[in-house]
Image (cartoon, grey):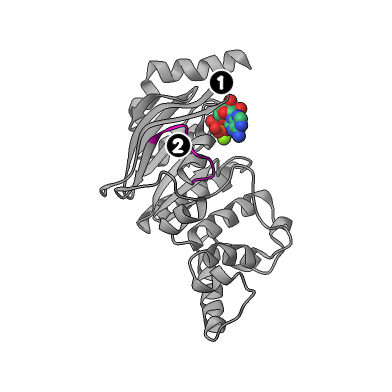
Amino acid sequence: MGQEILKVQGLQKSFGGLRAIDSLDFIVAGQQIKSIIGPNGAGKTTLFNLITGILPPTGGTFEFRGRPLNGLKAHEIARLGISRTFQNLELFGNMTALENVMVGRHTRTLAGIFEAGLRLPGMRREEREIREKAMEELRFLGLENKALMRATSLPLGEQKLLEIARALATQPELLLLDEPAAGLNMRETEKLAETILKIRQREITVMLVEHDMSLVMDISDEVVVLNYGKKIAEGPPRDIQRNREVIAAYLGEEADA
Ligand SMILES: Nc1ncnc2c1ncn2[C@@H]1O[C@H](COP(=O)(O)OP(=O)(O)OP(=O)(O)O)[C@@H](O)[C@H]1O
Ligand SMILES: [Mg+2]
């Protein structure tokens, strides 16, 4: 396992009177699969929104490879090598699967800055390279035969994989996956598990938010458990499964339902 890649210290996020993230500390080591679990509303997506610069924290700090992320804009954080997928799919419906992945790739290139408006010599070649890299990512996720289909015409499971392809096309060092298994059947979930392990083999660190406990327990190196924005447990899966406070938090959720 690699060195520390992400360090979160004293992180706070309030929405009015609600503390969505409360004094949160943790470290993610490089090339680890670190899962964030917790009942609905625990603050998992908020944490991803803070790390990726979509929301500003109310307090606390985070560092990526020793570099403070506070105050950086979302696109600056993306360029440093942090990428994500969304709990609610955010694909471009009027584009093909391939074009959706190419959009991810554009954040990495000079031509991307010009947003396809102004064309300079050399861009055609750059465009071809972007297309080839995007195809590689589609192949990595087994979607090469869907490249020219409209993204939103694909079944949900494939749309979720497509979002992962797009995030990978930015060449992240840290990939945040927000409920990638939601809506997938058992076979698709097993394939997703293999895919996440293959992503780690590419030396990409993965943070996984997921409600599918067997997926989390099978593939995670470490798990952080949030409840009402607070960390109530952290450790390897086998310790988390036996943790009384964790079990109580989940039973509490069932009792409420
Ligand atoms: N932009 C926002 N404005 C106000 N409140 C918010 C906002 N985003 C999240 N919240 C609140 O913060 C809390 C944490 O929400 P969050 O979406 O992070 O939970 P979650 O752990 O991802 O839940 P789920 O498992 O249901 O996706 C919830 O009470 C939610 O209503
Ligand atoms: Mg969420």
Q: Position of residue 123 (x, y in %)?
A: 55, 81
Task: Name the residue that disc number 2 marks.
Answer: 216
Residue placed at 33% from the left, 26% from the top?
A: 239
The residue at label 1 has a CB less than 8 Å from ligand 1: no
Residue 175 to residue 55: above or below: below
Q: Amino acid at mark 1?
A: Gly
Disc 1 crowd rating (10 Å Cα; few below 14, some 14-19, many 20+) is: few
Q: Hey, which quadrant is residue 54 in on the image?
A: top right
Q: Does the image show residue 212?
A: no
Upstream in sequence: badge 1 or badge 2: 1
Which span of residues is magenta-colored? Answer: 53-60
Q: Amino acid at mark 2?
A: Val
Disc 2 crowd rating (10 Å Cα; few below 14, some 14-19, many 20+) is: many
Residue placed at 65% from the left, 55% from the top?
A: 91
Under circle 1, the secondary element is: loop
Residue placed at 64% from the left, 50% from the top?
A: 90
Q: Position of residue 69 (x, y in %)?
A: 40, 46
Q: What secondary structure is the magenta-colored segment mainly? A: loop
Query: Closest to the observer: 166 or 8?
Result: 8
Q: Pointers 1 and 2 in contact (CB under 8 A)?
A: no
Task: Name the residue that disc number 1 marks.
Answer: 17
Under circle 2, the secondary element is: helix
Rounded to the nearest angstrom, the CA distance separating label 1 from label 2 is 31 Å
**Number of marks present in the image shown:** 2
Q: Position of residue 71 (x, y in %)?
A: 44, 45
59 falls in the magenta region: yes
Q: Does the image show residue 179?
A: yes
